[in-house]
Amino acid sequence: MSENIMTLMLSVSTFLGALGLVALLWGVRTGQFDDQSKFIDAARYDNEEDLRDAAMMEEKKKAHKKKKAAQKKEYMPVD
């Protein structure tokens, strides 16, 4: 093969690899892979009452996190 073709193939493959790496890092940073318990919860909460309880527990967790964040913001050290 010609040297020009080899250089072109090497540069295109390097560009595509870098593009894939950037896409992976973007997915990790934006939380695209954070659904850790999807299939476990689907098997565990398979009736309607359990699903309602699970949704209520998630709401309580979110409210608790918001409350903790608000308390951190309000903290002022003693002078």
Image (cartoon, grey):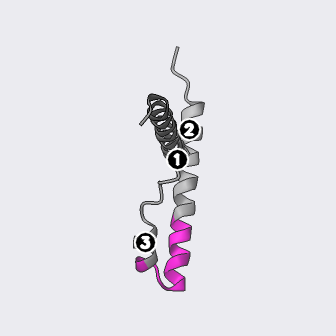
Residue at 57% in and 61% down:
59
The residue range painted magenta reads 43-57
Report the magenta stretch's main SS.
helix
Residue 3 x, y percent position in the rendering? 44, 29
Work out whether 58 lies above or below 44: above
Residue labelled with disc 1: 27
Residue labelled with disc 2: 71
Residue 71 x, y percent position in the rendering? 56, 38
Residue 38 x, y percent position in the rendering? 46, 68
Residue at 42% in and 60% down:
36
**Crowdedness of circle 2 by 10 Å Cα count: few (<14), some, many (20+)?**
few
Looking at the image, which residue sits at the far top?
79
Q: In the rendered image, which quarter is residue 30 located in?
A: top right
Q: Is residue 70 left or right of residue 28?
A: right
Residue 58 located within the stretch drawn in magenta: no
In three-dimensional space, the C-alpha distance between marks 3 and 2, rounded to whole angstroms, equals: 34 Å
